[in-house]
Image (spheres, rainbow, N blue to C red):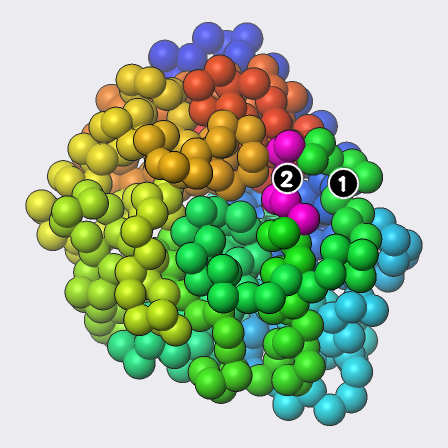
């Protein structure tokens, strides 16, 4: 569908290019984020991918989510990676022999038939399932899609709100930077500084076989990621708060948790069930998010270091993501809108896409992964947030910039927030999928 503000050539180039990327990255039951850098299925990637795929093939979008949910553990966790057994172990680190998910005896109950990681990623899945259903309700009903995924999505959300409530206030904690999806965000530097890194020589970084080192996390970061993941694995992936060395309440992760609880209410209602439990929980979580993570002084939500017992004094785009939520007080939304356009994120001024981290921050780097570059999934979420809160003109401008940047960068993983120059890998699936969604 063309929009009046959208030259048809950009739309058709974007649409055709994005469709080519998604077709090339489809493996038969799910989509790899990238054929080279990420040759397996990733959890939150699949959520974003399904949101775009629903416009091309609602059935494929349903399968994307069902394949992921098919690897759910008995305790409800949805693993952050589902490994493709046909891919050589050397293609990605950490590989299945590192995570050892199917090894007998894990109290958490990993599946035996498939190898997965043991950590999680932001819970966008109920949001994605609801959007996928709405794209073609008849096809969804025909396959019994909602009826099959609903119990799994509920178990996933309950894993997070019950087993991961380390702060004791209802919000979910992440126990590894990879769980945030924003792996090397400067927000994780203070809590990570307590972690003794694993020796660099003890592992091989397959990411550097495909990616430019200056676009990727450092070896020191990786040493800490490895140490934390090994520790969790060696504890049988048990979720006792005392067993964790890293536990953080991330506003981006929790915003998606709440958005998904709202989506579960919609799904329950569509199935003829009572949605009120989900609605109440979403409202309670929103109240807690505001009490615990909102910083009026900083103009956005801050992460809370649960072990250190204090907020992390860094501005990340994750702190703007609660804009996707309904039910925020008017002064909070107006402050968030101001912050997005102000000196720290520059939207519509210094930058045309929101950077992942504070432009004025001491750790800002326009090239290095989640320490500054602009990401398409974050900006897609913000586009929805702007629209939800009535900033239609700004949302339209952001949408046009996203489409232009996706095409100009070859569907890059992320871009320099000032120049739009492509960074990371190309033909990246969620960039393509969200392009298609913006065009719909
Ligand atoms: C990146 O993370 C993985 C680890 O999970 C990696 O660097 O190897 C992140 O950008 C994450 O958000 C994303 O889901 C994943 C796959 O695209 O890549």
Residue in view at x 14 percent, y 49 percent = 296
Look at the numbered disc 2 and give the secondary structure of its residue. loop
- Residue 167 is situated, as x and y percent measured from the top left of the image, at 33, 76
- Residue 341 is situated, as x and y percent measured from the top left of the image, at 25, 27
Q: Residues within 10 Å of mark 2 (few under 14, many from 20)?
A: many
Is 208 positioned to the left or the right of 335 in the image?
right
Q: Is mark 1 within 8 Å of ligand 1?
A: no
245 lies above or below 361: below
- Residue 318 is situated, as x and y percent measured from the top left of the image, at 38, 47
403 lies above or below 243: above
396 lies above or below 29: above
Residue in view at x 38 percent, y 37 percent = 362
Look at the numbered disc 1 and give the secondary structure of its residue. helix
Disc 1 from disc 2: Cα separation: 8 Å
Q: What residue is disc 2 on?
A: 216
Asked whether the residues under the numbered discs 1 and 2 touch, taking CB atoms below 8 Å apart as contact, a structural biologist would say: yes
Is 370 positioned to the left or the right of 37 in the image?
left
N-terminal label among 1 and 2: 1
Residue 93 is one of the magenta-drawn residues: no
Is 12 positioned to the left or the right of 265 in the image?
right
> In which image quadrant can residue 113 be found?
bottom right
Task: Residue 208: give its label.
Answer: 1
Q: Which residues are magenta?
A: 214-219
Q: Is mark 2 within 8 Å of ligand 1?
A: yes
Residue in view at x 74 percent, y 76 percent = 101
Q: Number of marks in the image?
A: 2
- Residue 222 is situated, as x and y percent measured from the top left of the image, at 65, 54
* Viewer-proximal residue among 440 and 395: 395
Residue 217 is one of the magenta-drawn residues: yes
């Amino acid at each position: 569908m063309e929009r009046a503000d959208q030259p048809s050539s950009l739309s058709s180039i974007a649409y055709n290019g994005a469709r080519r990327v998604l077709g090339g990255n489809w493996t038969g039951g799910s989509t790899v984020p990238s054929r080279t850098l990420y040759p397996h299925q990733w959890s939150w990637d699949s959520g974003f991918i399904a949101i775009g795929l629903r416009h091309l093939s609602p059935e494929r979008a349903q399968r994307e989510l069902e394949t992921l949910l098919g690897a759910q553990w008995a305790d409800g966790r949805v693993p952050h990676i589902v490994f493709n057994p046909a891919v050589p172990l050397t293609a990605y680190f950490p590989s299945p022999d590192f995570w050892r998910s199917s090894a007998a005896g894990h109290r958490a109950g990993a599946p035996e038939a498939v190898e997965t990681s043991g950590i999680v990623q932001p819970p966008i899945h109920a949001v994605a399932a609801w959007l996928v259903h709405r794209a073609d309700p008849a096809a969804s009903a025909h396959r019994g899609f909602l009826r099959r995924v609903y119990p799994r999505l509920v178990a996933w959300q309950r894993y997070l709100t019950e087993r991961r409530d380390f702060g004791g206030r209802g919000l979910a904690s992440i126990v590894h930077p990879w769980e945030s999806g924003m792996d090397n965000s400067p927000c994780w530097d203070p809590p990570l500084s307590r972690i003794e890194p694993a020796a660099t020589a003890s592992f091989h970084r397959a990411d550097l076989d495909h990616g430019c080192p200056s676009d990727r996390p450092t070896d020191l970061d990786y040493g800490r990621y490895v140490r934390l993941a090994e520790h969790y694995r060696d504890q049988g992936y048990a979720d006792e708060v005392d067993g964790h060395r890293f536990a953080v309440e991330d506003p981006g992760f929790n915003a998606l948790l709440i958005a998904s609880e709202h989506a579960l209410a919609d799904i329950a209602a569509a199935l003829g069930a009572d949605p009120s439990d989900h609605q109440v929980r979403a409202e309670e979580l929103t109240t807690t998010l505001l009490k615990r993570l909102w910083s009026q002084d900083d103009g956005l939500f801050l992460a809370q270091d649960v072990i250190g017992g204090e907020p992390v004094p860094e501005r990340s785009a994750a702190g703007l993501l609660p804009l996707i939520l309904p039910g925020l007080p008017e002064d909070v939304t107006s402050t968030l809108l101001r912050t997005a356009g102000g000196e720290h994120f520059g939207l519509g001024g210094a930058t045309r896409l929101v950077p992942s981290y504070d432009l004025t921050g001491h750790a800002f780097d326009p090239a290095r992964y989640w320490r500054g570059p602009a990401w398409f999934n974050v900006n897609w979420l913000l586009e929805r947030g702007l629209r939800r809160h009535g900033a239609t003109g700004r949302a339209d401008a952001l949408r046009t910039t996203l489409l232009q940047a996706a095409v100009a960068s070859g569907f890059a993983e992320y871009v320099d927030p000032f120049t739009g120059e492509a960074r990371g890998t190309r033909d990246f699936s969620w960039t393509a999928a969200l392009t298609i969604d913006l065009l719909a």
